[in-house]
């Protein structure tokens, strides 16, 4: 029974418990150390809780640790308690309870003399001085199983020791503890049963071993310790195969080892070879090539114990392969195929030629590409595996195809006769030369010399190649050389004038021509046109010029064929230009123009109006246009024509004919000195100038209308009638018409007289020649009277019926056809009855001309 008391005694007890826990922490594994560290913290916390426990609070009880025969509990102190009693009662067991009593300052205590692997009910009672229970608490826990005992401990591996121990009832697991005798190593391992092995130990080292049983309550006390030593470690074997029949095994000396045992066995065999040695290197010989051997190595200590064993497997180097066949491979890329017999244990083969080429493979054949042509070399094969290479095989000789000639050319000493020629190459027996034309036709020759003749035509490309042959065969490829003959001349050249200064040349394409150079040459100039198409337009040529046209086919390889014949073709005539247009009469105009062409050129002048077209032609520099109607506007152009074609029209000029004269002109006399002239509309005229002309004077009028009122007319005079029609541009037409005679002059000085015999006499004076009859009209209020006076007479008598009337008197001449002049002035007279000799003019009035 142990107790932890309050006060000085309690502090000492607490310190003792803490030290015990710290010791256990130092002497256990990391996991257990963490658990014990937690328990230490809990114990310290419980002590603090005890000092802080307030009045009236129940105490708290927990199990701190257990062993197989004891159980330590801790609790929170209770104020007023003078002692504590702990009772351990076995559960489900007839055993008697065990109790322990502690002072009032105690917070941790142990109950001993318990049974292993038994569940106990732990009861804590806080009592005062009168042994009255102030508070109580209970908890349950199981004691650890019984302490096991070690039967034996031994080491089979250099890093572990196996422990055989007695298993105890109720243990769920066991803890193996290993400590070095020097105290610098401590380790615990959990195992489920016996035997158990603790690992991660050092080779050939002494350890103190113990066992503890574990259940849900905790662990038992350690068993009685025993000592054991680990064995030596295994040698670290390094293996190699220096030859295809030996294996060399080496290792570093193993500490504390006095002897080594090696056992070698061939893969797939049960035969073993065992060898003991104190050396650190052993060579096994007389082995099979390319075969895997496994070597097991073990070290012995001075006590005769074998340590760890280690196994290393090593394959011997392969046997040298035998080359069975070397073949030059066909195709565009020259190469060789090497075949050999496979050897055991080889996983790779390397083939080398005497000129340094190589290939590698896992098969029994290999291709070396590219191989040089025209060479005689040898080849050998080396087999490889993980151990290294075999010895080289015996070399095998081979010869490659001859190289193709580098320099091939074609010579054509005469047109149509060609020869393929080339430089000779070594290791050749004969040559095959092939000549293929670009249309598919092919020829060849077999020769031992370096030339081959063939027939060639113009305009074709010939592909030539030469293949040399020897005992290995022909060169897999040959250099191809092109030879193109000069292109042929086109035979069907057609030249057409498509515009005045442009020639279109067309022809059928010819063989071998990639470009056509077309030229048009004349004395001073050459026009070029280069195109790939069989058509060409030569423009900007000089007009009315003969050109020599040549089509020259060209190719990039052979240049141009300058032997083709030219053709001559003339361009269109040059354009004439109108210099002047002169009117020769009312409907005729003379056109003057330039003549820039050869004398045999015909010139056409075309005048195009709104409703008609007029043409005149000439081979000179002038031409007359006739029957041009008045009042018209024409666009006049000149065109030259030759046997080649027409020129471009020249610049047009406008020709405006004079305006038409009015069809009719009518002159009407309005008064004795004034006339009204009217006329019909005139095509092309905008204004008119009308004139009446006589020896005694003239009258003129300028107007935009078709009528004109003209004064200053002399009566009884013959006038000529003229009219000038003027267009908007100033063109004039002089128009003459039938003359006009003004009316006879009205008499002057008209007077009315009464005579004695009741007659009235009208008297007047004539201004002009007295060649007209006169008529006299009297209009009175009571009666009207009329009388006629013969030519030369200057009065007229009228028999009056009544007197004292007022008369209007009009005296007017009567013209040739009996018409009366209507615009003579009337006069009014009052005529009294007899008794007065002279009438009296009352009034004078003007009479309307209408």
Image: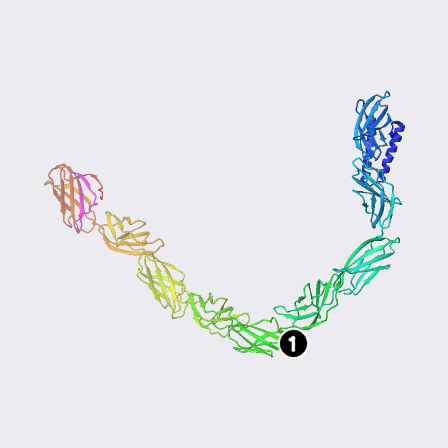
* Residue 359 sits above or below residue 610 on the image: below
Q: Nearest the camera: 744 or 525?
A: 525
Give the residues drawn in magenta, as a range: 809-831
Res. 43 in view: yes
Give coordinates of residue 99: x percent, y percent. Answer: 85, 28
Q: Mark 1: few, some, or many residues within 10 Å (few <14, many ≥20)? A: some
Q: Is residue 105 visible?
A: no
Q: Residue at x 86, y 34 (%)?
A: 18
Picture quadrant where residue 285 is located:
bottom right
Q: Is residue 635 left or right of residue 244?
A: left
- The residue lying furthest to the left in this view is 757
Relative to residue 484, is residue 310 drawn left or right?
right
Estimate the x, y position of residue 184 in percent, counting from the top left: 87, 44
Identify the image quadrant of residue 605.
bottom left
Q: Would you say 80 lies left or right of 803 here?
A: right
Q: Residue 477 falls in which quadrant of the image?
A: bottom right
Compared across the picture, whether 563 is left or right of 42 comes to left
- Locate the C terminus by quadrant: top left
* Residue bearing mark 1: 427
Q: Residue at x 79, y 56 (%)?
A: 311
Secondary structure under tag 1 reads: loop
Colour basis: rainbow
Query: Which of the pair 362/2 is nearer the observer?
Result: 2
Residue 534: image location, x then y, percent: 47, 67
Residue furthest top as drawn = 130
Q: Residue at x 35, y 53 (%)?
A: 728
Tell whether position 764 is magenta: no
Q: Seen from this angle, which residue lies furthest front?
A: 94
Number of marks in picture: 1
Between residues 111 and 424, which one lies in front from this camera angle?
Answer: 111
Looking at the picture, tell me which residue is in the foreground, 435 or 823.
Answer: 435
């Amino acid at each position: 029974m142990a107790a932890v008391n309050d006060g000085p005694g309690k502090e000492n007890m607490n310190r003792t418990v803490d030290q015990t826990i710290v010791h256990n922490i130092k002497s256990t594994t990391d996991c257990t150390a963490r658990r014990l560290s937690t328990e230490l913290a809990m114990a310290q916390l419980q002590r603090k809780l005890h000092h802080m426990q307030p009045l009236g609070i129940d105490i708290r009880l927990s199990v701190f640790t257990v062993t197989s025969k004891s159980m330590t509990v801790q609790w929170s102190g209770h104020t007023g308690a003078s002692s504590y009693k702990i009772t351990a009662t076995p559960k489900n067991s007839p055993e008697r309870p065990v109790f322990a009593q502690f002072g009032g300052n105690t917070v941790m205590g142990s109950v001993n003399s318990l049974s292993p692997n038994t569940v106990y009910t732990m009861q804590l009672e806080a009592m005062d001085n009168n042994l009255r229970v102030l508070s109580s608490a209970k908890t349950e826990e199981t004691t650890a199983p019984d302490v096991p005992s070690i039967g034996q401990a031994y080491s089979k591996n250099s890093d572990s020791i196996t422990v055989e121990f007695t298993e105890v009832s109720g243990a769920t697991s066991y803890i193996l503890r290993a400590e070095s005798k020097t105290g610098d190593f401590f380790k615990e391992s959990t195992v489920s049963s016996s035997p158990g092995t603790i690992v991660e130990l050092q080779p050939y080292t002494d350890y103190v071993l113990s066992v503890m049983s574990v259940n849900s309550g905790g662990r038992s006390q350690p068993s009685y310790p025993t000592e054991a030593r680990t064995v030596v470690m295994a040698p670290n074997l390094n293996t190699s195969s220096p030859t295809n029949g030996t294996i060399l095994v080496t290792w570093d000396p193993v500490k504390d080892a006095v002897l080594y045992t090696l056992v070698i066995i061939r893969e797939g065999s049960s035969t073993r070879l065992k060898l003991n040695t104190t050396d650190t290197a052993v060579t096994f010989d007389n082995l099979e090539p390319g075969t895997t051997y496994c070597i097991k190595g073990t070290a012995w200590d001075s006590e005769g114990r074998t340590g760890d064993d280690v196994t290393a497997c090593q394959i011997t180097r392969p046997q040298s392969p035998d080359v069975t066949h070397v073949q030059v491979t066909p195709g565009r890329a020259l190469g060789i195929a090497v075949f050999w017999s496979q050897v055991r244990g080889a996983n790779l083969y390397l083939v080398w030629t005497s000129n340094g080429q190589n290939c590698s493979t896992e098969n029994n054949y290999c291709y070396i590409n590219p191989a040089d042509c025209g060479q005689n070399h040898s080849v050998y094969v080396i087999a490889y595996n993980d151990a290294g290479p075999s010895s080289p095989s015996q070399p095998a000789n081979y010869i490659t195809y001859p190289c193709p000639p580098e320099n091939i050319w074609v010579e054509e000493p005469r047109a149509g006769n060609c020869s393929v020629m080339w430089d000779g190459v070594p290791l050749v027996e004969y040559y095959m030369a092939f000549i293929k034309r670009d249309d598919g036709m092919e020829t060849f020759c077999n020769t031992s010399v370096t030339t081959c003749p063939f027939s060639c035509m113009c305009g074709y490309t010939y592909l030539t190649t030469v293949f040399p042959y020897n005992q290995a065969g022909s060169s897999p490829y040959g250099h191809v050389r092109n030879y193109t003959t000069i292109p042929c001349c086109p035979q069907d050249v057609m030249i057409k004038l498509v515009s005045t200064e442009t020639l279109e040349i067309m022809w059928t394409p010819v063989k071998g021509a990639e470009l056509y150079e077309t030229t048009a040459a004349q004395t001073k100039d050459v026009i070029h046109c280069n195109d790939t198409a069989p058509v060409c337009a030569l423009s900007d040529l000089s007009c009315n010029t003969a050109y020599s046209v040549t089509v020259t086919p060209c190719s990039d390889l052979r240049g141009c064929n300058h032997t083709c014949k030219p053709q001559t073709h003339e361009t269109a005539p040059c354009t004439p230009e109108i210099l002047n247009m002169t009117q020769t009469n009312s409907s005729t105009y003379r056109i003057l123009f330039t003549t820039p062409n050869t004398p045999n050129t015909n010139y056409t002048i075309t005048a195009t109006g709104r409703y008609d077209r007029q043409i005149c032609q000439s081979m000179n520099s002038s031409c007359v246009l006739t029957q041009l109607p008045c009042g018209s506007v024409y666009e006049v152009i000149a065109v030259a024509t030759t046997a080649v074609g027409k020129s471009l029209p020249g610049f047009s000029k406008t020709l405006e004919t004079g305006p038409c004269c009015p069809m009719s002109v009518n002159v009407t006399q309005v008064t004795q000195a004034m006339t009204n002239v009217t006329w019909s509309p005139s095509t092309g005229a905008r204004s008119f100038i009308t004139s009446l002309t006589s020896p005694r004077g003239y009258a003129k009028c300028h107007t935009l209308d078709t009528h004109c009122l003209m004064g200053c007319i002399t009566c009884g005079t013959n006038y000529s009638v003229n009219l000038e029609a003027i267009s908007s541009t100033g063109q004039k037409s002089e128009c003459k018409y039938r003359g006009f005679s003004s009316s006879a002059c009205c008499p002057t000085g008209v007077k009315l007289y009464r005579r004695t015999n009741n007659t009235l006499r009208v008297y007047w004076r004539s201004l002009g020649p007295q060649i007209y009859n006169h008529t006299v009209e009297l209009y009175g209020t009571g009666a009207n009277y009329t009388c006629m006076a013969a030519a030369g007479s200057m009065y007229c008598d009228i028999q009056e019926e009544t007197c004292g009337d007022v008369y209007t008197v009009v005296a007017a001449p009567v013209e040739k056809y009996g018409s009366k002049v209507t615009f003579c002035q009337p006069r009014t007279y009052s005529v009294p009855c007899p008794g007065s000799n002279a009438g009296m003019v009352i009034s004078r009035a003007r009479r309307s001309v209408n």
